């Protein structure tokens, strides 16, 4: 493995060093000054032409990630990338196609909320038989400081993963009605998003993502024909522990044993649905799948 960039570098190093199958060949900060970290310092280009490097972790700034993912793919290196990588569906689709045509695996580091949703669903299932699912309510609260240093809104940072998980579990969407607002920060990107979702199978649900909190919280209520179930106050997994699981999946995908947990296909799907929600919010109306206009 080689690591390009410094974003979340310490936790990536901790995981790579803890996995016996991974050997860190080198790290590059991308700048002229070489880091004082106790690992081999080389340039991005030097690492990409090293035959010993089989996989690359892209931890550059968000604006540079797409470029270095492409460069890594062209060099025949499997890629594990920090998120966000791109900000639009077309960019995500093109990047996924580029990696697939290059014959490499693209894996995205997903936030803890992805596994927390799965845990919430398991808790609901263990609550008893609620019959046919009719409606759900999903509420996610994020610490305000998580948004303070970046330009991205809650839909890109969390909505991409939330929407992929929901459609994987409940099936394709039929329509959405969303509202987004920036109320706590003086910028264009939203820190509050609320959406009503209607699925093709008749299930309906509401999603609220709020980036104004003091800590990360999640609550999930599922209403069925025979009862209800709920799960809340999910404690997010350790970022290092969760990242280790993602690296293990990335290694298996690079060996051709499985697909990435969250790869190029899921990235494009999530970005498509986030743009769908954004269109509904701009037009202030319910938008059906056939009406989605991609930028």
Image: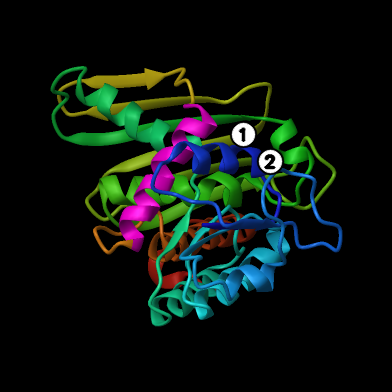
Measuring from the top left, give residue 107's x and y in whole percent: 44, 58
The answer to whether residue 168 shows anywhere in this view is: yes
Q: Which mark is residue 222?
A: none
Q: Nearer the viewer, residue 49 or 104?
A: 49
Display coloring: rainbow
Instruction: Say which residue appears at 27% left-offset and 20% top-offset.
Output: 229
Q: Choose top left, top right, bottom left or bottom right for residue 215.
A: top right
Residue visible at 30% across and 30% down?
A: 121
Residue 235 drawn above or below residue 78:
above
Which type of secondary structure does the marked residue at label 1 adopt? strand
Question: Disc 1 and disc 2: Cα gap in Å?
Answer: 6 Å
Percent across and percent down for residue 161 are 46, 48
Question: Quick check: 248 left or right of 87?
Answer: left
Most common secondary structure along the magenta stretch = helix
Ranked by sequence position, the earlier of labels 1 and 2 is 2
Residue 239 included in the magenta stretch of the image: yes
Q: Is residue 30 left or right of residue 259?
A: right
- Of the numbered discs in the image, which one, if any, rests on residue 210? 1
Label 2, on which residue? Answer: 191
Q: Whole-percent x and y of residue 162?
A: 45, 44
- Is there a contact, CB below 8 Å, between mark 1 and mark 2? yes
Q: Residues within 10 Å of mark 2 (few under 14, many from 20)?
A: many
The answer to whether residue 207 shows anywhere in this view is: no
What segment is highlighted magenta in the picture? Answer: 237-254
Task: Assign a secondary structure to mark 2.
Answer: loop
């Amino acid at each position: 493995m080689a690591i390009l960039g410094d974003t979340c570098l310490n936790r990536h190093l901790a995981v790579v060093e803890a996995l016996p199958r991974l050997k860190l060949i080198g790290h590059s900060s991308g700048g002229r000054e070489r880091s004082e970290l106790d690992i081999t310092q080389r340039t991005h280009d030097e690492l990409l032409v090293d035959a010993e490097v089989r996989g690359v972790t892209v931890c550059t700034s968000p604006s540079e990630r797409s470029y270095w993912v492409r460069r890594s793919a062209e060099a025949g290196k499997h890629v594990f990338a920090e998120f966000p990588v791109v900000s639009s569906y077309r960019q995500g689709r093109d990047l996924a196609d580029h990696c697939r045509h290059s014959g490499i695996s693209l894996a995205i580091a997903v936030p803890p909320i992805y596994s927390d949703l799965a845990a919430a669903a398991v808790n609901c299932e263990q609550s008893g038989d609620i019959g046919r699912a009719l409606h759900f309510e999903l509420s996610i609260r994020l610490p305000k400081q998580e948004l303070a240093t970046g330009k991205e809104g809650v839909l890109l940072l969390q909505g991409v993963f939330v929407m992929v998980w929901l459609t994987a579990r409940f099936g394709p969407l039929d329509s959405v009605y969303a509202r987004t607002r920036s109320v706590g920060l003086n910028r264009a990107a939203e820190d509050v998003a609320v959406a009503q979702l209607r699925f093709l199978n008749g299930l309906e649900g509401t999603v609220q993502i709020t980036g104004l909190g003091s800590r990360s919280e999640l609550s999930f209520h599922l209403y069925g024909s025979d009862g209800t179930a709920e799960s809340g106050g999910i404690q997010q997994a350790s970022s290092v522990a969760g990242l280790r699981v993602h690296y293990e999946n990335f290694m298996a995908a690079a060996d051709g044993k499985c697909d990435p947990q969250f790869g190029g296909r899921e990235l494009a799907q999530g970005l498509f649905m986030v743009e769908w929600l954004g269109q509904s919010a701009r037009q202030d109306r319910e938008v059906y799948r056939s009406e989605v206009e991609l930028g």
